[in-house]
Image: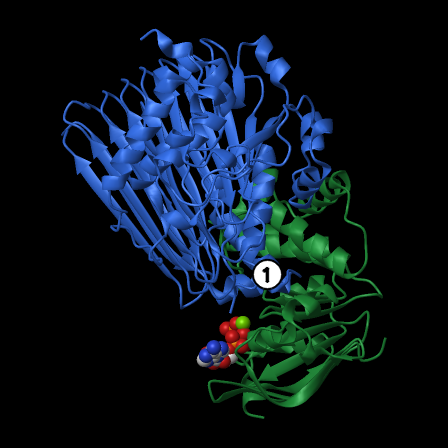
Amino acid sequence: MKNFLKIKDLSISVEDKCIIKNLNLNINKGEVHALMGPNGCGKSTLSNVLAGKEGYNITNGKISFSGENLLKFSPDERANKGIFLAFQYPVEIPGVTNINFIKTALESNRQYNGLDPIKPGDFLKLIKEKSKLLGISDENLKRQLNVGFSGGEKKRNEALQLMMLEPSLAILDETDSGLDVDAFKIVADAVNSTRSKKNSMLIITHYQRLLERIQPDIVHVFINGSIIESGGPELAEEIDKNGYERFNNA
Amino acid sequence: MSDNQEKLTDKDFKDPYEYGFETEIDSDFAPKGLNEEIVKFISNKKNEPKWLLEWRLAAYKKWLTMKEPNWSSVRYPAIDYQDSYYYAAPKKTEKIESLDDVDPKLLETYNKLGIPLKEQEWLAGVAVDAVFDSVSVGTTFKEKLKEDGVIFCSFSEAVVEYPDLIRKYLGTVIPRTDNYFAALNSAVFSDGSFVYIPPGVKCPMELSTYFRINAAGTGQFERTLVIADKDSYVSYLEGCTAPMRDEHQLHAAVVELVALEGAEIKYSTVQNWYPGDENGKGGVYNFVTKRGDCRGNNSKISWTQVETGSAITWKYPSCVLKGDNSSGEFYSIAVSNNYQQVDSGTKMIHLGKNTSSRIISKGISTGNSSNTYRGLVSIHPKSKNSRNFTQCDSLLLTDSCSANTIPYIQSKNINSIVEHEATSSKISDDQLFYCRQRGLNEEEAVSLIVNGFCKDVLQKLPMEFAVEAQRLLSVSLEGSVG
Ligand SMILES: Nc1ncnc2c1ncn2[C@@H]1O[C@H](COP(=O)(O)OP(=O)(O)OP(=O)(O)O)[C@@H](O)[C@H]1O
Ligand SMILES: [Mg+2]
């Protein structure tokens, strides 16, 4: 599908501060886009707005997803329609086990989309398979959601949820940050394995090395709330080498 | 006394002068109001022995001189005790042999409430003694229990069948004049459950009773007595859901537990009386006295409760740790929504040596409600090497609700340790957003987070109850986020 996600002239402010300015971005089905930009340029803000978080003032522009006006849907409707955000800072939810949380989320998704509940046995098989791929122990599945998880463990857990929920648009907000060298490879390859013609990804990262493992179709350079240049993987290589200087001065 | 077994019959009371309303005797309702005649009427209806009538009358006389307690945080208009019925029997009064003989309408009500009695029978062996209004109408699994010598029956039946046990234990944990509401209950209690577990017996199934309020304007005065003899064990489940109604109803139950040497009693409650509407109109006043007596050495009593209903809850299930090495536990979840008022907690009275108690209280408030934990831990001078641990957590969902934690600690033995921890928190926007980003709607998200908050207590409930309790938590918080 063309323009699976279409962001047109989007401007967003928080507490009267304009953070995103006239942003345009089109992602077709099956494409992987990378978004790179310096700290504080508005990447997480954009992810949050796509996912429907409250507290942002959309001063201008439109977002359509799968042909529908995305902005009219609640966060859970967006999630159930296939938008998944792997958080830069996943939150802790005490008393709720990781596995139970994922099951609840999966059930909500399935119910919304008119599917029968997954059989407990099938669920267990699926989650064991995916967590093995990501190197997540059974013990961590039974722990309380993100409570006391290390930074890297939290990120792996976001990847696990992504793989379990199989979204049609996955937004990864610095999922690679905080992972050790080995975990980095494991998670990147696992995420890359979910790539298909039927889904799209928006990958937010500071590091070109991630894009070696998940090769993007398009790389966007995001400065001060707008995309100022888009191109192929070579753009990421340039940023890796020379930083954002050229773009800042542009 | 030799007249333990003496039964008063209707005939003894047919004297119109003594009664003053002879024609009323056969009616299903005693007339409105409360006086000595009513107390006699109730006792007579139940074929009670004379000593019990006297016991009731003594309680009644004392009650007349007592004052309604006003030290708690709950506020309500004055109750007119003369404007209520104190006895109501269901239409059918014959003894019921099996569930097939139960009024189908009644069974339907249970079904609507999600508690199919029929299914309960087949389920993993839960014995059900259903209390409908004031008289028990269905008792199952009795035969199986009998094999082990376990007695599980309605309180009225126990009075007739096991008067010695009743006489020996009634009022020994909660004296009939203990407090205003306990005295009232002692005077006019209608029915309830009786459990006796013989020495060395581990009760082969969870015992459960479902309480209901159904007849309009009928105060409920349940009376429960559980006795675990030496080295025995019993798990007792109590749950209640009341249908919608518009006027305040007083519910003043008394529950007494006695654990003899080496015995253990686990008492779990899911309470969901009608809480009143969103404007605070209607709802049940739940003024309950519950106390367990760890009478023997090495005995143990554990209270677990999930309180979501009632307009007002005034309730402090307590443990008196008399025996050496005895232990008491209190695990509680109290939810308050709209204009509900909760003042609840526990009392742990350490009398014996090496006694221990553990309190975990989770209060969830939303709407305009108020939720107070009030707990007493008292360690007496002779209670050497005793310890208490208390954890009180409050979760607030709105800005207009309130939560309070009021711990009273009296430690009179320097070798004993009392620990108290308290937290108060709100559900964060980030937590809610995280859940919703994964597809849960707002109510599901709140319910998940609340269930997580309550986990330590929920896991103390027997399995089948835990599921029901979780459902209840979600239902009671519906529409509560804002
Ligand atoms: N709620 C808020 N109130 C005030 N300022 C905010 C708020 N949310 C975001 N900002 C500001 O908006 C800007 C963009 O923040 P954002 O988190 O989107 O950056 P980012 O591109 O994700 O950065 P990083 O690479 O460090 O993750 C920052 O200057 C940030 O301080
Ligand atoms: Mg960010």
Q: Give the class, few, some or many, for how many residues have Cα within 10 Å of label 1's Cα (few <14, many ≥20).
A: some
Residue A249 point in image, percent of width and height:
55, 92
Q: Secondary structure at mark 1?
A: helix
Q: Is residue A89 left or right of residue A10?
A: left
The relative height of residue A33 versus residue A94 in the rendered view (above or below) is below
Q: Quadrant of residue B210?
A: top right
In this view, the residue in front, A51 or B343, is B343
Judging by colour alone, the chain drawn in green in this rendered image is A
Q: Which shade is chain B?
A: blue
Q: Is residue A183 left or right of residue B264?
A: right
Residue plotted at (67% across, 39% down): B106
Residue B37 point in image, percent of width and height:
38, 34
The relative height of residue B24 versus residue B445 in the rendered view (above or below) is above
**Which amino acid lies under the numbered mark 1 shown in the image of this protein?**
Glu
Which residue was labeled with disc 1?
B443
In this view, the residue in front, B377 or A65, is B377
Residue plotted at (69% across, 23% down): B98
Residue plotted at (73% across, 58% down): A109
The total of numbered circles placed on residues is 1
Say if residue A146 shows up in the picture.
no
The relative height of residue B168 versus residue B285 in the rendered view (above or below) is above
Q: Residue furthest top?
A: B2
Residue B248 point in image, percent of width and height:
46, 54
Say if residue B297 shows up in the picture.
yes
Q: Quadrant of residue B321?
A: top left
Q: Quadrant of the N terminus of chain B?
A: top left
